[in-house]
Image (tube, rainbow, N blue to C red):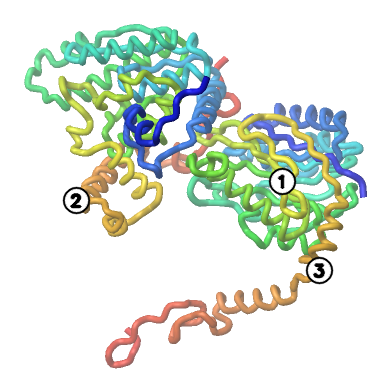
């Protein structure tokens, strides 16, 4: 028996609504990306002499994707996920993260960072939301690096290319890691890969948020939409278009200038801090070695 | 002319671990010999790994290094192309690829073009070679060896073919990038290399061999995709992307003669024309003669003329 024929219009009406908007120039071959990333994760661990990995699972799409990719690369039994809510974090975030853990079958631990954060700010009730948010990100980093010792694994980064380029990260907070498998993927490419690896639809659909205060979303806070921002960054950074050329392509001039300033202003977050050049050989200047080399492997 | 079995060693060298890589090379030579291979090709810096940076001097070998000699001795009845960091007597470091066969080192090619742009930083750590030669081999045909970036300069395959090469061999450590879904195999780098190798094979009516590594050094993922292209530009074999392996392919060397009789491009080449025009271009760039494409009023060696002031003098 064959299915009854449907007209193209009927088929279109019946097709599920796309999970997200994907600019065509940002489409990647997800099968190739999965292969490269799996080999990258295994290579990074092997070169460092590790077999295990640890990462912070927020309930958002970036860390969910990295958890899936890491589990795919080394097996879920070698992955520890840390769920680190603060008391004002959305309960749905924890639930979504726990769903990832259930689906992957990886190890997990919930660490409430409220006492650490509240303890520090007890005498500073007027601290701004931004300061508190950055502090939370750095507390999570501290917990991840502590557990990386007990779990015997490397910390896997979960930042994407969009937030890295515009500087929507906390220095030595969420940006801290041993290696990052998705740092060269824009947010819309993260979504594309998340669909390919089977991340739950609820995670893919929900509005991206740093979840540092109730109701916060990236797109409200930055006044942008990811698919447009990604397109702009792609043409600006990857394809080297000038501001004038970008405007000619149809991008809004004020947005082009604003995003250009965000990228330039966050250069410091993407680089190793400079060391004053004094001696004959200086790390990062004229002492240049691969991170992993003979003698650097543990044990 | 007999059929030649070419073995492509699409390996993932261990970064900086010379002894381990030497051991792997010896094992692969033995494996290829048992499979009846006549020519075994290893990727660029297969003995050291690609991203050596300041490790280059630690893993460098002179051409008389006993470790290298051990490997050379393992080529009885075989031809192989191996690649390593070479240190000259006066302590310059080069990315080298050597043709070793029947227990002797037949030829050493030093990489001519060292990419130092974008993700590459080779000129910082290595010197560039000054010699390009096709070499005769025990296989009965001339071989032309090039390393990776050398083949992004059209003069290299051109000169090798004019010099008598009938098999062009490019050994590479090409990092994969540009993961566009619109490209042929999902990877922009692979599409570029596939185009280059087919074009060179056809234009030089030669067998073109591309051996690229796999594995990961730091941020770079090497994509493999080694190939052998016949003299009419058709792929005789394409290795899988990303997978490590020893792949063999049989090539009928008589195809080269057939193609060159049918399509005598090399017979019709005009090296004297090329040399004459190059001499002119070099003289123009050096400011020794007027540049035919420079603006009127430009200085010797420059091609843009300053704007004259209103009174006619130069500002």
Query: Is B136 located above or below residue A35 in the figure?
Result: below
For marks 1 and 2, give the one nearer the viewer. 1
**Side of B101 relative to B62 (left or right):** right
Query: Is A109 located above or below residue B254 in the figure?
Result: above
| Disc 2 element | helix
Where in the figure is residue B70, as x and y percent of width and height?
Answer: 83, 34
Residue B169 in sight here: no
| Disc 3 element | loop
**Side of B142 relative to A144 (left or right):** right
State the mark number for residue A47. Answer: none
* Badge 2 density bin: few <14, some 14–19, many ≥20, Cα 10 Å: few
- Which residue is tagged 3? B267
**Side of B175 relative to A10 (left or right):** right
Q: Could you tell me if the residues under marks 1 and 2 are in contact, i.e. CB atoms within 8 Å?
A: no
Query: Is B125 located above or below residue B133 in the figure?
Result: above
**The C terminus of chain B - image quarter:** bottom left
Q: Residue at x 39, y 42 (%)?
A: A24
Q: Are marks 1 and 3 on the same chain?
A: yes
Mark closest to the chain's N terminus, 1 or 3: 1
- Which residue is tagged 1? B235
- Which residue is tagged 2? A254
* Badge 1 density bin: few <14, some 14–19, many ≥20, Cα 10 Å: some
Q: Residue at x 30, y 55 (%)?
A: A249
Where in the figure is residue B1, as x and y percent of width and height?
Answer: 92, 50
**Subunit bearing disc 2:** A
Q: Residue at x 29, y 8 (%)?
A: A111
Residue B6: quarter of image: top right
**Subunit bearing disc 1:** B
Residue A62: quarter of image: top left
Q: A63 or A169: nearer the eye?
A: A63
Query: Is B98 located above or below residue A176 in the figure?
Result: below
């Amino acid at each position: 028996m064959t299915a009854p024929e449907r007209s193209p219009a009927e088929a279109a009406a019946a097709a599920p609504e796309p999970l997200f908007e994907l600019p065509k120039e940002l489409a990647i071959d997800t099968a190739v990306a999965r292969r490269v990333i799996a080999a990258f994760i295994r290579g990074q661990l092997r070169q460092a002499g590790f077999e295990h990995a640890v990462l912070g699972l927020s309930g958002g799409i970036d860390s969910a994707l990295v958890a899936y990719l890491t589990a795919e690369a080394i097996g879920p039994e070698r992955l520890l996920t840390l769920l680190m809510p603060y008391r004002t974090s959305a309960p749905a975030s924890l639930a979504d993260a726990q769903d990832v853990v259930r689906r992957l079958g990886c190890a997990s631990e919930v660490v409430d960072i409220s006492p650490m954060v509240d303890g520090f700010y007890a005498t500073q009730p007027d601290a701004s939301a931004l300061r508190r948010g950055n502090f939370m990100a750095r507390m999570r980093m501290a917990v991840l690096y502590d557990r990386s010792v007990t779990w015997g694994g490397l910390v896997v980064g979960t930042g994407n290319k969009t937030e890295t380029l515009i500087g929507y990260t906390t220095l030595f907070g969420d940006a801290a890691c041993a290696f990052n498998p998705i740092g060269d993927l824009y947010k819309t490419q993260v979504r594309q890969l998340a669909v390919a690896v089977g991340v739950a639809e609820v995670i893919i659909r929900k509005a991206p948020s740093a979840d540092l205060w109730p109701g916060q979303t990236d797109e409200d806070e930055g006044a942008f939409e990811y698919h447009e921002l990604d397109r702009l960054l792609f043409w600006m950074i990857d394809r080297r278009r000038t501001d004038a050329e970008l405007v000619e392509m149809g991008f809004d001039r004020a947005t082009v200038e604003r995003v250009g300033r965000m990228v330039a202003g966050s250069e410091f977050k993407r680089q190793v801090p400079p060391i004053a050049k004094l001696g004959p050989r200086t790390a990062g200047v004229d002492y240049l070695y691969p991170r992993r080399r003979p003698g650097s492997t543990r044990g | 002319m007999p059929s030649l079995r070419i073995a492509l060693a699409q390996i993932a060298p261990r970064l900086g671990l010379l002894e381990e890589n030497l051991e792997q090379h010896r094992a692969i030579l033995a494996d290829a010999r048992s499979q009846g291979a006549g020519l075994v090709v290893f990727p660029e810096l297969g003995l050291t790994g690609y991203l050596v940076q300041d490790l280059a001097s630690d893993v460098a070998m002179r051409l008389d290094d006993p470790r290298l000699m051990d490997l050379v001795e393992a080529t009885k009845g075989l031809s192989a192309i191996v690649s390593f960091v070479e240190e000259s007597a006066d302590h310059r470091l080069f990315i080298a690829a050597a043709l070793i066969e029947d227990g002797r080192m037949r030829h050493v090619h030093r990489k001519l073009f060292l990419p130092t742009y974008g993700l590459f930083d080779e000129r910082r750590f290595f010197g560039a070679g000054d010699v390009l030669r096709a070499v005769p081999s025990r296989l009965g045909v001339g071989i032309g060896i090039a390393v990776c970036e050398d083949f992004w300069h059209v003069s290299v395959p051109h000169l090798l073919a004019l010099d008598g090469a009938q098999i062009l061999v490019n050994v590479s450590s090409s990092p994969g990038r540009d993961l566009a879904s619109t490209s042929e195999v999902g990877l922009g780098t692979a599409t570029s290399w596939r185009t280059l190798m087919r074009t060179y094979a056809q234009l030089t009516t030669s067998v073109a061999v591309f051996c690229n590594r796999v594995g990961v050094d730091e941020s770079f993922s090497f994509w493999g995709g080694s190939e052998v292209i016949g003299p009419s530009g058709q792929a005789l074999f394409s290795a899988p992307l990303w997978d490590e392996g020893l792949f063999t392919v049989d090539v009928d060397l008589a195809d080269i003669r057939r193609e060159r009789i049918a399509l005598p491009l090399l017979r019709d080449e005009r090296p004297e024309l090329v040399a004459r025009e190059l001499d002119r271009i070099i003289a123009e760039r050096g400011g020794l003669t007027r540049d035919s494409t420079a603006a009127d009023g430009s200085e010797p060696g420059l091609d843009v003329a300053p704007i004259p002031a209103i009174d006619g003098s130069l500002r």
